Image (tube, rainbow, N blue to C red):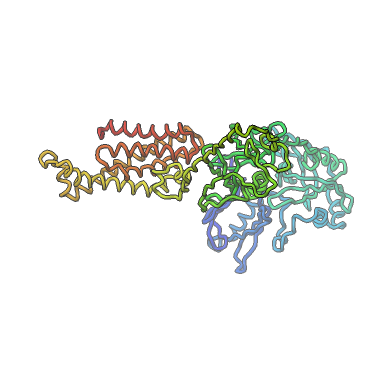
Amino acid sequence: MHNDEVQYYASPILVKNQQYFATLTNERLIIEGPTSREFKTTAILAAHPTHLQEREPAVKIVFSTPAGQKEMIWTFPCDPAFQEGEQEAWTDNIRKIIGDNPLAVPAEETEDARPDITKDIVIETEKEKPKPSETITIIEARPEVKTEEKPAGEPDLIPGESVVISTAGVRIKHTFFTIYLTNLRLILQNNAGKIGREFAISDLKDAAELESDAGEPEIALSVGMQSGLRQMILSFPTKPARDAWMSELQAKLPAHRPAPKVEEPVMPERIGTFVPATNEKTLVTTPNVRIKNRLSVIHLTNTRFVVDSASGIVGEFALNTLNRAVRMASEIGEPGIALKIGSASGEKEMHIVFSAVNDREAWMDALSEVIPDRTASAIPETRDYSLSHVTPQKPVHTQQISCPSCRAMNHAADTYCSFCGAELHPEPVEEHPQRRAKPEKVRRERPPRAPKPRMPYNGSIMGFITRPTDAFEYYCRDGVKQALPLFLVSGVIWSVITVLFLAFIIPLMLKLDKATFPIITSLSGNPLLLVILMLMLFILWAVCVLLHGVISGGLSALLEPGASFGESMGVVMRSSMTYAVCGWIPILGMFAASIWAAVCAWKGIAASQDMGQGAAAAASFVGLIVVYAVLICIGVI
């Protein structure tokens, strides 16, 4: 409890045969036990003494919750002689806290089903109004109360609170109150001068004028509770008092305030930074598209395909470079498109991942209109490509004639060549038979030799050192986890072959003397020393390659914001396969393998991370230089 909170009563209780400890304060009802709960005192509607089947004293408490009115039965784990005292103490203290609640549920009503609070207000009003005969009797019995008289003892107001209007002798159900309306709340004070109930202005939803069957002026006030909207009928002693209250309530309640004017949001003129050129028509535009783990906005116009981002246009491609569009799915099943784009360096594939299937289908329809021939005649990726030679067209019938100048085929009825404009039927020139010129020989140019077709990369492991560009484009999504097995196998092969060469081959080739080189010559006879040396070389090699990968991955992410650190490090780890191929060669093998691995990493980073050649080379070779500098400093080299 905080400093301003006052405790009224506390004792152990039983709820469904489970013991709890209940504490009642001026603000909360706290129940502590296996599962602790607390309720505001404003949510307590009523507390009634009752008895169980064994005549055990109990207390029934009615709460207002968002799901409706809920009941809780308390019994007391004390001596039977004190149970009735506990029952009376809890009932009196709870009633003292909640006061005369005009919305409280009577004791006889709690036994039956609760009325539906969402029913029509008119039906609930008729249910709560007393009978005409009872109303007349009550009006004759109560004394005349003037609205101008101030009640004896106004309620305590908080700083900044002021009374707007007050009226005494207002009847709610069968109890008379003096009601106050301040700038913050509605207060109901009973005849004893105690606050029976209070409501915040925000809890008052609506107010309507009514008249009872006996002609009493009334106001139906709708109050928002946790369990829903409830209605309270206030019967005023005079009509002017009712009218004055109605005027003040209409000025404060939200149902009677004019709705504020909401300005229509200004729609953006365009999405992204792309602006179409003059006479350029945008076919489809889609935001929040992922390309290489980067969110972009893509546009397709009648002239180009544009990839846009918050910092500007990332790339644009002419429509004649779009070769093929195929549906695909990402690693987690998101809809996407694999778009083949031709360039001077060859055909590349761009993976576009959409957030919805409808966006993907809209782009497939638009791309099918732009590149219908290419998508229809696309060759499956598993089929081998072949090159064919183009030969000059031969005349298929006698209605065609060859041009005497350019040898192009034309229709026999044409006068001039449609290709070069020369005359197809020149008039023959009579020459002297002896001086007739010999026809010039037409030199036929040989068709250029077709280049040898390159076999497509099929995903082999040797491609990481023989064809790094193709291999890393094929495995562009692989990171450290996928490259780890090949990395470990390469290091084991290198360390084992290096130690075997050092122990068995080099002493025979160089004819080393045991007295001059005792350590090297003793390796062949000590298997434990061989294993220890293999393990040491493997650990040193792994640390150097991983340091190279960390530096290259960090530089690639720094030079290209879209590059992935893990994928760049995986490229360096796969490139370390060169050590298993040539790193075990004595003297020059290590240097050749490290430079070869740096070149493969350069090509792999450029292909998999879509980086420039200069940035990829810097990321790869700077890491190698740092590794050699560290080895020189610690004295290994």
**Residue 206 x, y percent position in the rendering:** 79, 45
Number of numbered tags placed on the structure image: 0
Q: Say which residue appears at 70% left-offset and 43% top-offset.
A: 411
Q: Say which residue appears at 87% left-offset and 57% top-offset.
A: 133
Q: Quadrant of the N terminus?
A: top right
In the rendered image, the vertical position of residue 131 relative to residue 145, given as above or below: below
In the image, 605 versus 191, the foreground residue is: 605
Q: Quadrant of the C terminus?
A: top left
Task: Report whether 278 appears left or right of 321.
Answer: right
In the image, 347 versus 575, the foreground residue is: 347
Q: Is residue 120 visible?
A: yes
Task: Report whether 247 appears left or right of 600.
Answer: right
Task: Report whether 214 appears left or right of 455.
Answer: right
Q: Say which residue appears at 52% left-offset and 47% top-offset.
A: 387
**Residue 333 x, y percent position in the rendering:** 56, 52
In the image, 549 versus 199, the foreground residue is: 549
Q: Residue furthest bottom?
A: 54
Q: Is residue 150 visible?
A: no
Q: Quadrant of residue 51?
A: bottom right
**Residue 620 x, y percent position in the rendering:** 40, 35
**Residue 549 x, y percent position in the rendering:** 39, 39
Q: Residue furthest left?
A: 515
In the rendered image, the vertical position of residue 572 relative to residue 432, given as above or below: below
Q: Quadrant of residue 410?
A: top right
